Each structure stands twice: as C-alpha cells, then as structure tokens.
Image: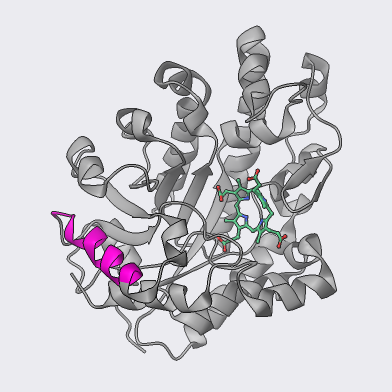
C-alpha cells in the first residue's frame, strides 16, 4: 500500500500529480450487471437503506475498474425523507407530497440526518474500512455527496403543467420569499448532512446542482449560489475538499467561481480549455468527456480521452471525469478504456 495522499486529494490541493486522477460520476449503477442483480433483489431504496449493500454497490466499480475514488452509493433525495418528503423511484424520484404553498414549506422539518438516514454514514465508514484494506496501486479517495438546494427544490416543488422544472422557477418568481424559506430549510439539512458525511470519513464532498443550469446568471445568484456558499463554507471549515457540478453551466462559470468550492466539475458542452481560461487558476477543474462518447468504438474513445487531456494547460488541479453521469447501457469495456487512457498520464 502506498501511504501518500490519494491523487484526487493531491489534485484538489494543487500538488503536482504524477498522472491525472480519474473517476466517473454515477460510477455505481445500472450499466453494471453486478448492480442490476443486487437491485432486482433488494430494490433501489433497499440498496440505499442498507449500509452493507450500499457499501457493496459503492465498491463494485472500484474493484472492477480501479478508478481513483469511490463515491458513496445513495441518492440526492435521501436526506429529504427526514424533512417529511415521501418518495419512490421509477427510475428517477417520484414525490408523493409536492410543495405548493407557504404552509407546505412551514410543515417541513429541519431534521437531523443522523437520525433520519444513519445508514448513509454507516455505509461511508464501511467503505472507508474496505478502501484501506484494498490491495491497490494507489490509495483511493472517498467522495460523499449531496444535491444542491436548488436542484432538490426542482424535484419537490409541484410542477403543474410545466416541464424541465420550470415549475420551480415559476414558484420562485411568484413567491421569492417562500422560495428562499424553502431553500434555507433544505440548506440547513444539507449542511448537517455533509458535515456528518465528513465526520464518518468522506474526504471530498461533491455537490450536484444538476438543474442549476436552467437559471440565468442573476437568478442563479439569487436562488442557488448563496445556499451553495453556505454549504461550501461549512465543508471548508472541516478541512475537507469540495467539488461543485452544475449541468449546463457554460453561462454560469463566473458565478460558480464565487461558490467557495475547491473544484468546478464542467459539463461536456464547455471545452476544458475555455473553462480553464475563464475560471481562476485557484480552482481545480473536473471533467468533462461527453457520456455518450462512451458508446463510440474503443479507438475513437481513446483518442477523445487523450484529446481532452491534451487540451489542458495544467499538470495539477485537475481530475478526469465525464461531463455528466454515466448512462445506462454504457459498455463496461468503455469504462475501462476511458480510465486506462487517462492513466497513460499527462
Ligand atoms: O433504476 C435504478 O437503478 C436507479 C437509478 C439510480 C441510481 C443508480 C438513481 C435514481 N439514483 C442512483 C444513484 C445515485 N444518484 C448516485 C450514486 C453514486 C454514484 O455512483 O455516482 C448519485 C451520485 C446520484 C445523484 C443524483 N440523483 C443526481 C445528481 C447527479 C446527476 O446525474 O445529475 C440526480 C439528479 C438524482 C436524481 C435521480 N435519482 C435517480 C435517477 C434516475 C435520477 C435522475 C432523474 C432525472 O433525470 O430527473
């Protein structure tokens, strides 16, 4: 076992890395047969709610493909259950009692995730132990995560006739104060949730603002950024590193710079060199191969991965990844091809 820090932590601290570290967003999941087999027995929430099974599903891609990180298996909705929000999955979140009014917001509890979802923290401790026992060439980082308050609000606010979460935008503009109260309550819970993940052993916290990109820059600064700033300030106070992923974020890059995250995870639509030129050099970058490129043939995928790396001007402060989560039906050979191509080095 090598006892230096995991490459991902070196990259987030801007220490020089012998090669780019690599992992894949949503690396545990439906493209893996081992995952599908376990899910067919226990159901998605059954996997999330069992610390043993969540740890096992977390470790499946780590053992199969040797990425530089494990990301804890769970879902962004899990900490909301303690607030009184009821949901199922099919395959995405289906919410029973959507938020419509101020009184719905007032009824939400600012619960303690240690009570409402203790299994997440038990799974983190278990994965931490398993990673330390793994016979791997490099130590691996353990990544915890949460949804951004805006993205969580997208799922829980009533959408009525609106598509693509515009219902949440309409809700925010009709009742900005109610929306801010809702976002503040979600943030209160998410702060507790990520701090408990750090306490349990997470070394990096990634926040997913998957629907932040539907907002224009000014609205982003009102309805997403201040809540992210609170979360990242708290994560920073523990000494833990942080990553912010915002899908469809080309127009938001300068706003994201003010989030307080250590690293911006760039979606595939923005060329990495453009992100590198726009963002301050103090910020690390993560990304950003188009997840659909994993369906190309091996030669093309290898070439595209090497091209992604050669577009960068830096040799640290960078984590190779996809530009969004890996898709169902992705060929597993492509996952290995992508990881191996990154491991060829700078
Ligand atoms: O049918 C199934 O097998 C369930 C599919 C699935 C999985 C594997 C869902 C339902 N969630 C997950 C796990 C999950 N969710 C992880 C696992 C850790 C990993 O390996 O990376 C993570 C990080 C998430 C986070 C998540 N859930 C996000 C943010 C990331 C992103 O892709 O933008 C979002 C938006 C969700 C909501 C969600 N949960 C599940 C689905 C299919 C979705 C997306 C639905 C939608 O597009 O609205």
Q: Quadrant of residue 248?
A: top left
Judge by depth and name the residue closer to the eye, 247 or 46.
247
- What kind of colouring is applied to the model shown? one colour
Judge by depth and name the residue closer to the eye, 134 or 171.
171
Residue depicted at x 17% and y 61% = 310
> Does the image show residue 41?
yes
Q: Position of residue 30 (x, y in %)?
A: 65, 67
- Vertical relation: 281 (above or below) 180: below
- Vertical relation: 155 (above or below) 162: below
Query: What segment carries the magenta color?
Result: 300-313
Q: Is residue 267 magenta?
A: no
Q: Position of residue 78 (x, y in %)?
A: 71, 50
> Which quarter of the frame holds ligand 1?
bottom right
- Vertical relation: 10 (above or below) 77: below
Q: Is residue 306 left or right of residue 29?
A: left
Judge by depth and name the residue closer to the eye, 122 or 101.
101
Q: Main secondary structure of the magenta part?
A: helix
Which of the image's four quarters has the N terminus?
bottom left
- Vertical relation: 51 (above or below) 218: below
Q: Quadrant of residue 137?
A: bottom left
Q: Position of residue 201 (x, y in %)?
A: 53, 65
Residue depicted at x 38% and y 48% = 268
Q: Quadrant of residue 298?
A: bottom left
């Amino acid at each position: 076992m090598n006892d230096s820090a995991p490459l991902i932590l070196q990259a987030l601290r801007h220490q020089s890395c012998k090669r780019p570290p690599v992992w894949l967003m949503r690396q545990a999941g439906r493209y893996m047969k081992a995952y599908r087999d376990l899910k067919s027995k226990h159901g998605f929430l059954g996997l999330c709610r069992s610390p043993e099974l969540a740890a096992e599903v977390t470790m499946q891609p780590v053992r199969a493909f040797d990425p530089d990180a494990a990301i804890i298996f769970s879902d962004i909705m899990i900490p909301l259950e303690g607030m009184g929000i009821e949901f199922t999955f099919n395959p995405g979140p289906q919410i029973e009692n959507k938020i419509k009014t101020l009184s719905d917001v007032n009824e939400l509890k600012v619960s303690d995730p240690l009570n409402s979802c203790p299994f997440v923290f038990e799974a983190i401790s278990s994965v931490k132990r398993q990673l330390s026992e793994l016979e791997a060439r490099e130590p691996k980082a353990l990544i915890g995560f949460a949804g951004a308050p805006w993205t969580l609000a997208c799922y829980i606010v009533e959408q009525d006739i609106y598509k693509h979460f515009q219902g949440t935008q309409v809700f925010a503009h009709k009742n900005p104060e109610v929306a801010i109260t809702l976002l503040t309550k979600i943030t209160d819970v998410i702060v507790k949730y990520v701090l408990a993940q750090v306490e349990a052993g997470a070394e990096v916290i990634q926040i997913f603002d998957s629907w932040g990109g539907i907002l224009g820059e000014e609205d982003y600064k009102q309805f997403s950024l201040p809540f992210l700033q609170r979360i990242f300030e708290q994560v920073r106070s523990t000494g833990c590193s942080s990553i912010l992923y915002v899908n469809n974020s080309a127009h938001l890059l300068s706003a994201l710079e003010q989030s307080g995250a250590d690293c911006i995870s760039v979606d595939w639509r923005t060329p990495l060199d453009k992100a590198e030129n726009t963002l301050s050099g103090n910020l690390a970058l993560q990304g950003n191969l188009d997840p659909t490129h994993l369906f190309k043939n091996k030669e093309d995928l290898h070439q595209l991965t090497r091209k992604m790396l050669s577009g960068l001007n830096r040799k640290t402060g960078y984590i190779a990844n996809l530009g969004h989560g890996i898709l169902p039906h992705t060929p597993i050979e492509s996952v290995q091809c992508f990881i191996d191509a990154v491991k060829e080095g700078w």
